[in-house]
């Protein structure tokens, strides 16, 4: 099971992760933390050897810092969770999937700009909560 929110997280190799993210390695954890979540969830599928992933992870971390109060952020290393990579049809990494009530609402593949993520995430948060 991955790191838990508030108790620190397991850092990704080569990346200092100090914000509230949850590392997912098993399908049951993904179901509990993403599919059954009572809040929106952003999941990044990545690999430690992937240069585009390493370039993107600081953007994902910034989003986690900005929206942690309203959105859960999880990381899925495709080398540790190949079953999730197949189940969610991850063809290229990094891929970010946004979920609301267990359903995928948005998907980005190798999008490095933070703006599309901010717009989509903000749209899932009730206005009175922002």
Image (cartoon, helix red, strand yellow):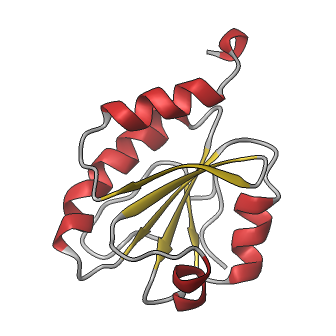
Q: Where is residue 68 drawn, in percent x and y?
A: 57, 38
Residue 25 lies, with reference to residue 24, above or below; the image says below
Report the residue at 76% width, 61% height from top: 35
Report the residue at 23% width, 77% height from top: 50
Tell me which corner region of the image, top left, top right, bottom left or bottom right, holds residue 30: bottom right
| Quadrant placement of the C terminus | top right
Report the residue at 33% width, 71% height from top: 93
Q: Where is residue 114 drawn, in percent x and y?
A: 31, 37
Number of marks in picture: 0
Q: Where is residue 69 drawn, in percent x and y?
A: 63, 32
Residue 86 lies, with reference to residue 18, above or below; the image says below
Q: Where is residue 100 drawn, in percent x and y?
A: 71, 44
Q: In this view of the protein, which residue sits in the foreground, 32 or 121?
A: 121
- Looking at the image, residue 38 sits to the left or right of residue 115; the answer is right
| Quadrant placement of the N terminus | bottom right
* Residue lying farthest to the top in this orientation: 128
Residue 60 lies, with reference to residue 123, above or below; the image says below
- Looking at the image, residue 130 sits to the left or right of residue 78; the answer is right
- Looking at the image, residue 77 sits to the left or right of residue 24; the answer is left
């Amino acid at each position: 099971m991955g790191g838990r929110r508030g108790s620190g997280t397991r850092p990704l190799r080569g990346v200092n992760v100090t914000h509230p993210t949850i590392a997912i390695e098993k399908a049951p954890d993904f179901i509990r933390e993403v599919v059954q979540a009572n809040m929106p969830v952003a999941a990044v599928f990545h690999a430690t050897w992937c240069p585009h992933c390493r370039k993107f992870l600081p953007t994902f971390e910034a989003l986690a810092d900005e929206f942690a109060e309203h959105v859960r952020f999880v990381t899925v290393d495709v080398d540790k969770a190949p079953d999730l990579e197949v189940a969610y049809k991850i063809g290229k990494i990094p891929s970010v999937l946004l979920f609301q009530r267990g359903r995928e609402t948005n998907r980005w593949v190798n999008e490095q700009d933070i703006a599309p993520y901010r717009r989509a995430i903000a749209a899932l948060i009730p206005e009175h909560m922002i």
